[in-house]
Amino acid sequence: MAARTALTRRCAALTSFRALSSPGILSHSRHLPRRFLATPSDQSTDASNGTAIVMLNMGGPGTTDEVGDFLSRLFMDKDLIPLGPLQKYLGPLISRRRTPKIQHQYSEIGGGSPIRKWTELQAREACNLLDRIHPSTAPHTPYVAFRYANPLTEDTVKQMLADGVSRAVAFTQYPQYSCSTTGSSLNELWRLSKKFDPENKIKWSVIDRWPTHPGLVEVFARHIEESLATYPAGEREKVVLLFSAHSLPMSVVNRGDPYPAEVAATVWAVMQRLKFSNPYRLVWQSQVGPSAWLGAQTATTVEEYIKKGLTNLLLIPIAFTSDHIETLYELDLEIIGESKQPGIKRAESLNGDPIFIRALADIAKAHLEGGGRTSPQLFLRCPKCTSERCREQKAFFRRQQEEPTAAS
Ligand code: FES
């Protein structure tokens, strides 16, 4: 019931966004190139000057009709789901078979993913703040580049070129780096830059990870504290905190992907901020297919803890910056809803929390203040990486760094 109530609240937010997105209000804001959508006084914003802040994420289908295309792109991405030499055939086949089931899941959470709404809001608000706290690189123009859904990275890159952008920051919205997520987005960005911007009119720098940024840690900690406050005083300190992150195939983990260590770093930092007030575990969700994935699985963990008599569990989505299907459907409806345990709850996602927006602006400010330097970690390939895409992508972004622009 608690899960349903929370879901109703979140779906209402999604519905109100849809109303806002009706023609004439936000419908043309595919990439949010101008903040006059939000603030009439910003109509003079000129993307050809200043700095483009490009939020990278996987995206999600805005409607159930978009699910097929979304899954097709997802299962064709060799960086995310390596299916071997038959990927060209297997990808479309798997996506076609999964589409009806996933469409049903999206219909259960209000008919589409809210990730675009939240990412656009985060981008816009963070840029507004950046203009104030780092005016030397203003105006900061928000763009959104999704890997598998609209606004697609290709459309955003084309739009940026049409807008005359000359300086851009690729800002991953995955706080913890994985070659499957941020790596995939950067590979796509490199590929598209080569195709559409061979003269390198846009100079890029990259914010590739921020797993322990104090603002990120603070907003997670506050959301946990708010949820803990809903438990009776005598039970509160015994609530088990289950930090849940999207899992990875073990083939990716064993290749040397940095994601598990970086997610663990976030969990540790949040627990430090909470003064280790509660017992906790890091668990992994959303496994797909029969191969081995990183565990323990979130769903199994909840079942096993219930059997052990632990029915006060707080789930915390620790690797997502906003709600999407993995929180609204998988955690809220499947795991929490089906447990029928009132003590099993979920902490709110970061979404539009002003502390989180401030954190985004601070991360970008620090990056720009440092001359737009990318962390050395980005240039170190996984020990078992054999991907030419990765090699070329890293060489591309390294060259960008070696040719600083006036804006940086
Ligand atoms: Fe990690 Fe290529 S797979 S750098």
Image (cartoon, rainbow, N blue to C red):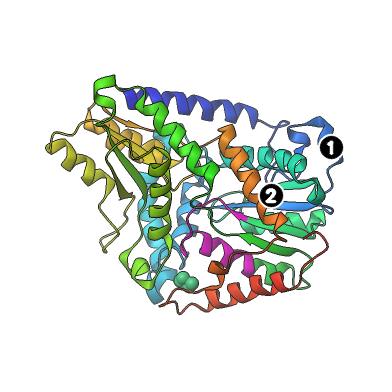
**Residue at (59, 72) in percent of width and height:** 393
Is residue 104 something that shows in the picture? no
The quadrant in which residue 190 appears is bottom right
| Span of residues in magenta | 171-191
The dot on residue 43 is 1
Q: Which mark is residue 365?
A: 2
Assess whether residue 105 is covered by the magenta stretch: no
Residue 85: where, in percent of width, then height?
40, 76
Cβ atoms at labels 1 and 2 below 8 Å apart? no
Q: Residue at x 62, y 57 (%)?
A: 153
Q: Nearer the viewer, residue 83 or 139?
A: 139
> Which quarter of the image is occupied by the C terminus?
bottom right
- In space, the residues marked 1 and 2 are separated at their CA atoms by 23 Å
Look at the image and tell me in which quarter the N terminus lies.
top left
Give residue 189's quadrant in the image.
bottom right
Q: x, y percentage for residue 177?
A: 48, 59
Frontmost residue, 307 versus 269: 269
Number of on-image labels: 2
Instruction: Classify mark 1: helix, strand or loop.
Output: helix
Residue located 78% across and 35% down the image: 36
Mark 1 CB lies closer than 8 A to ligand 1: no
